[in-house]
Amino acid sequence: MTALGILYPGHSAEDDYPRIEQLLGSDVRVDVVHTDIGEDAHRVDALREMGSAERLAAGVEELRHAGAEAVVWACTSGSFVRGWEGAHEQVRTLAVAAGMPASSTSFAFVHAVREIGARRVAVGATYPDDVTALFADFLRAGGVEVTGARSSGIITAAEVGTWGEDEVFMLARTADRPDADALLLPDTALHTAAHIPALEKDLGKPVLTANQVTVWEALRLADRRVNAPSLGSLFTREPIVQV
């Protein structure tokens, strides 16, 4: 059994994780521990506080007791708002506190883009314009070309969590660009796990979503690879039969 640790802020789309666990169809357990969200606001100061070392450290003991082999901070905006170097420091501090390999959803996106061989991406964000721009800057710092970034101007994760299939597809279609090799949907408060293959079929390209890449990143840190086409192109890079 491979046990993955997820630190998830508050309660919005955390039910994506048991769905992903089921879709992996293998001996992988995804343990979710909720961190204190503080002020629910897609605002830089609130997001920086949400991802503070103290808030993240408070959740790691439970993951250690659960036998987690790696931990990922499942908040894209709560990591990229610190910039490339600040986000690195955040996960270094988390790794020390947890006593295991650590990462965040922001780095998961960069690593996943490399995994699928994409060079240019489009971004469909739920965030306000200034926060979306910081995500695009973070991707560029990771060597990813951003061809376009659409913002939705939503302030709270709670509101994002109410979005259904229609809103997700509308965001994806309006954010996509013909010159993008892949589309990124960066908010972990957005329910996407049930829609990834349909989104990829609709757009004709890989789609990377926040909760999807978070679990993939945890698997990568645990040195575990899984073929799971129901989770999109990202999970088809490995042979179906594994040793």
Image (cartoon, helix red, strand yellow):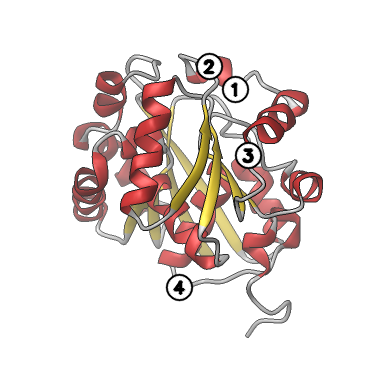
Q: Give the residue number, with chain letter if any, for mark 1.
A: 161
Residue at 71% from the left image edge and 34% from the top image edge: 173
Question: Where in the figure is residue 241, as x and y percent of width and height?
Answer: 72, 81
Badge 3 marks a residue whose secondary structure is helix
Q: Is residue 63 visible?
A: no
Residue at the front extreme? 179
- Say whether marks 1 and 3 touch (CB < 8 Å): no
Query: 10 Å neighbourhood of mark 3: few (<14), some, or many (≥20)?
Result: some
How many angstroms separate mark 2 from mark 4 (CA)?
A: 33 Å
Quadrant of the rendered structure where residue 10 is? top left
Q: Give the residue number, with chain letter if any, for mark 3.
A: 16
Q: Amino acid at mark 1?
A: Gly
Q: Give the residue number, with chain letter if any, for mark 4.
A: 223
Residue at 52% from the left image edge and 67% from the top image edge: 115
Q: How many marks?
A: 4
How many angstroms separate mark 2 from mark 3 (CA)?
A: 15 Å
How many angstroms separate mark 1 from mark 2 (CA)?
A: 5 Å
